[in-house]
Image (cartoon, rainbow, N blue to C red):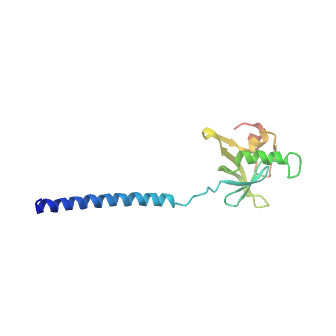
Amino acid sequence: MNPQKSSHLTILITLIFTFLITISLYYIKDIQSSSTAPLTISDNLVIRIIDGDTFELSTGQKVRLICIDTPETGEPGAQEATDFLTELILNKEVRLEKDISETDRYGRLLRYVWVNVTNNQEIFVNQELVQQGYAEVMRYEDDTARCDEIESGML
């Protein structure tokens, strides 16, 4: 083989080899970055049900459903309400809506709450508890914007 052809072949092989290494490093970097990316937890992920109308978010904040009241722990119907809320929202992301007050006297967020179900349909949790017989409508001072809606069963 002629020395000039050999030199060209060596350069071509070197370029191909360099190209292949560059592409490989690019894909390895992508695989490593995707496998080491931190898992994120939504701020609105429900991690614990406290009772039939109160739950805790992944942020540690406790949320009290407004415009409704369920039986207190130990009273008839309390466990059923807690079980229903657990089935409805535990380990799920929820959408929260504030009325007027940010929190109650216990530091719990006061919110209307929705949860996604199949086909991106939402359930209005406060209303669902009333409709299913686990809660009664209870108006809290100024936080009553959706109480009539909850009571009427209309969205």
Relative to 68, residue 17 above or below:
below
Q: In which quadrant will I find the C terminus?
A: top right
**Along the line of sight, which residue is nearer the eye, 50 or 66?**
50
Determine whether, in the image, residue 9 is placed left or right of residue 135.
left
154 to the left or right of 121? right
Left-right relation of 130 to 24 = right
Q: Where residue 153 appears, x then y in whole percent?
A: 75, 37
User: Which residue is found at the position 67% from the left and 60% from the top?
Assistant: 59
User: Is any part of residue 68 visible from this angle?
Assistant: no
Q: Residue at x 63, y 39 (%)?
A: 118
Q: Quadrant of the N terminus?
A: bottom left
Visible residue check, residue 115: yes
Q: Is residue 33 left or right of residue 94?
A: left
**Count of marks placed on residues:** 0
List the single residue furthest toward the left: 2
Name which residue lies at 33% across and 60% down.
22
- Of the pair 99 and 14, the residue shown nearer to us: 14
Query: Residue 11's image quarter?
Result: bottom left
How far across and down, in percent of the image, does residue 105 sit?
79, 60
Q: Report x, y in % for residue 7.
A: 16, 63
Residue 29, x across and y down, in percent: 42, 61
Q: Residue furthest front?
A: 1
* Above-or-below relation of 94 to 36: above
